Image: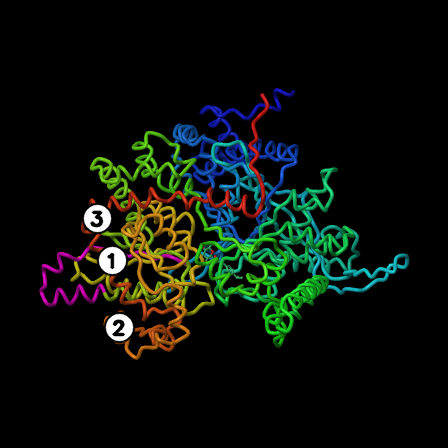
Amino acid sequence: LWKLLCTYLPCDVLSLQKSIVQHVEYTLARRRYKRDKCSFYQATAISVRDRLIERWTDTQQYLSSKDSKRVYYLSLEYLLGRNLQNAMSCLALRNRYAAALEELGYSLEELTEEERDPGLGSGGLGRLASCFLDSLATLNFGAWGYGLRYKFGLFEQRLISKAQAEFPDFWLKEGYPWEVERPDVQYLVRMYGEVEDRVDPETGEVKVAWKGGEDVLAEGFDIPVPGFHTLNTNNLRLWTSKASCEFDLGSFNDGQYYAAIEEKERSEPLTSVLYPCDNNAPGKELRLRQQYFFVSATLQDILRRYKKSPSHGLLDLPNKVAIQLNETHPAIAIPELMRLLLDDENLCWQDAWHIVHNTCAYTNHTVMPEALEIWPLPLVEQILPRHLRIIYEINHQFLSEVRRRWPGDPQRVARMSIIEESEPKMVKMAHLAIIGCHKVNGVAQVHTGLLCKSLFRDFYEMWPEKFVNITNGVNHRRWMLQANPAMSAVISKWLGTHDWVHDLGRLERLKELSSNPEFQRDWQEMKRYNKRKLAEFIERTCDVDVDADAMFDVHVKRIHEYKRQFMNILGVAYRYLRILSLLAEEKFDELRQVVPKVVIFAGKAAPNYSVAKDVIKLIIAIADTINSDTRIGGLLKVVFIPNYNVSVAEVIIPGSDLSQHISTAGFEASGTSNMKFCMNGSLLLGSRDGANLEIEQSVGRANIFMFGANTKEVRTLQTTMQYRKPQLDGRLAHVTQEIRSGRFGPTSFDSLVDSLLPENDRYMVGHDFGSYLEALEVSDAAFRKPEEWTAKTIVSCASMSRFSSDRCIREYAEKIWNVEPHQFRPPN
Ligand code: 26Y
């Protein structure tokens, strides 16, 4: 029996084939001899999942036996991307599955396309969480992710009538083969109701009871998270909401039966839909309820697992559990954990506070004032009356400490309070998170600097040791090995080994080869191959024919004013007008110098963010005009690729030459696609913001095109109003005049163009436009020298080791969580 238990499923090609065909027939109940890509994708996924599950249960068993400290990553968002190839590579079974499928008449590539992206996030923060899960497993940290299983992920974007249209993303339509439902993992989550003070007749102690209200049931769905070439397999647990009355539905008589069913229907929608905003807090009741539902189920689950071990006393929790809050979205965990410890576990305040404070840590991802979560106090009181009491007490004790440290400074007390004394009063979630956590981190050096110097300055003065920087990183195995197999093959060939996949520092050796003509030839061929694939994708999705020899200049990310896609399209319009005037003036020598270019945009705008949606309209209008102008002979093309998501990014990023990361300095906390582009041999054109600055340090000034005001200059300009120059840059004025005059279609885009007026220009487009155009010129000049360009792209790729999420996770483990890796090895 022991032998049987210790044996994993067979993984030779024949066994893999058998398992796929059996799943088609018995798990899916479909005809195994019918050609059906969807069924074969699903069966293959389940076959892979079987092989993950055995490692997964063994890992969990092993970690429990080691009694090792666990990390819990709490995030309202994940952007997992497709899982099939990632899981196969982790298991080191990719080639065997490919061979198995080949004989069954399918290519791995075509089945890969059958998988839908679970779009359970809106942007960088959600994708970062997913990169972290992969690195945590690969580095053998015992870590679980927790999140919500939204029925509808981030909306599907289509372009209809030259504008963004949103469609529901029902990603579960065909089922999601990677998840395992856990009907045995259920918790009740209460909301609303009242609190009552009760005096214990024996001790005279006052206890608070939370009564009444509504219960919602949380049920877990688990997704295995494999590590790369290690047996360690972690877990991502996503909660779905169910009506709690399902429990006792049977006991209702006829009259109450319908009411009960109605109530059941009412509880279901809690986890229906993801809020599609990024960097813009919706302030909606449903959102707060989602957050609390998520946090309460998660903490109950963590405590239950913790208490399973008889040796665990609650005071020991911070030594065995680290909880990371991804932004303030799960910050209600602070009072919730206090509530569980005080009311359910009967601890005293000091003990409970000690535990909460030493267990939790908070990552900030944005300094945009409109993204900071604040909740109307009456709303919190209505939904979470017990929590409001706890928040008051936390605030009371905290402000007493502030008063002791800074006597006679009421302004400081008011600034630091969790409660804002406005009408209505508001609860500031960031303050709650900072006070309740032992560490607060920013996600790039400048960003952390801004947290300490401005946004959270008072808190930094009080607790300087609480603040740390951990610059973001990305999972290079997904973004290089999986997304760019052609480049990975070239790298491994020239290094003579695959070891860079485990340790990105090994790429440094490529620098010596950067001018080697043969290596350069391989590298250029690889880039051209990826560009051709991207060109085919553009043809399919945008119906625009582009030349793979042109420079592919890419700007992909959420559409937001601070990210300045607007500035980019104005630059494109300027380039177009310049080509036309060169033609008109018959300046053929200068025309020959113009670098042929394809400008590629993609990204979603929040459905209620009208400025961002106008930017998309402007891009499409300008693209239409340029693409249909035969005079310019293909010197310039512009496309907007719809429905940007992780799998679209995996096609775009490897196929790019230049990528733009041009946010107004001080607004982009870090950015992570900048790292992915560099890793894929694309040069950055960047503002002095977020991680761009650290990338510049790593790749060297000669290998990146930086421009524009830095954070300090932006601040001075904004405060001294120096930027309110009466005159716009002449080139910008010319472009805007052409837009208004109808050169790019009948819409005049008045409100967008007016936003450039110096008094409206919050994001400094006017100020930076000139230096932006100069940076573009420098990049054009560099592109005209293919050998030099290629060497630059090789050097920047080879300089990326700092930006692997492996480095980043090791820093979290050391600076915040205090955890060690534990690698599971099978007994033999
Ligand atoms: C709904 C509202 C509360 C909200 C929802 C999502 C607020 C913010 C967000 C998401 C923010 C986000 O994605 N921030 C990005 O995090 C990345 C990872 O740290 C950074 O690289 C990026 O600069 C930052 O904008």
Q: Nearer the viewer, residue 73 or 244?
A: 73
The residue carrying mark 2 is 729
Residue 649 part of the magenta-drawn span: no
Q: Amino acid at mark 1?
A: Lys
Q: Nearer the viewer, residue 413 or 824?
A: 413
For label 2, the crowd category at 10 Å Cα-Cα, with few meaning under 14, some 14 to 19 and many 20 or more, is some
- Give the number of the disc on residue 547: none
| SS for dot 2 | loop
* Residue 539, image x, y percentages: 29, 51
Point out the stretch of residues depicted in magenta: 575-603
> Depth-wise, is mark 3 or mark 2 nearer the camera?
2
Q: Is residue 377 left or right of residue 699?
A: right
Q: Is residue 541 left or right of residue 415?
A: left
* Residue 264, image x, y percentages: 68, 57
The residue carrying mark 1 is 637
The residue carrying mark 3 is 549
How many angstroms separate mark 3 from mark 2 (CA)? Answer: 32 Å
Residue 2 in which image quadrant: top right
| SS for dot 1 | strand
Q: Amino acid at mark 2?
A: Asp
For label 3, the crowd category at 10 Å Cα-Cα, with few meaning under 14, some 14 to 19 and many 20 or more, is few
Residue plotted at (49% across, 47% down): 130
Q: Nearer the viewer, residue 680 or 31?
A: 680
Whichever of callouts 1 and 3 sits on the residue coming sooner in the sequence is 3
How many angstroms separate mark 1 from mark 2 (CA)? Answer: 25 Å
* Residue 18, image x, y percentages: 49, 26
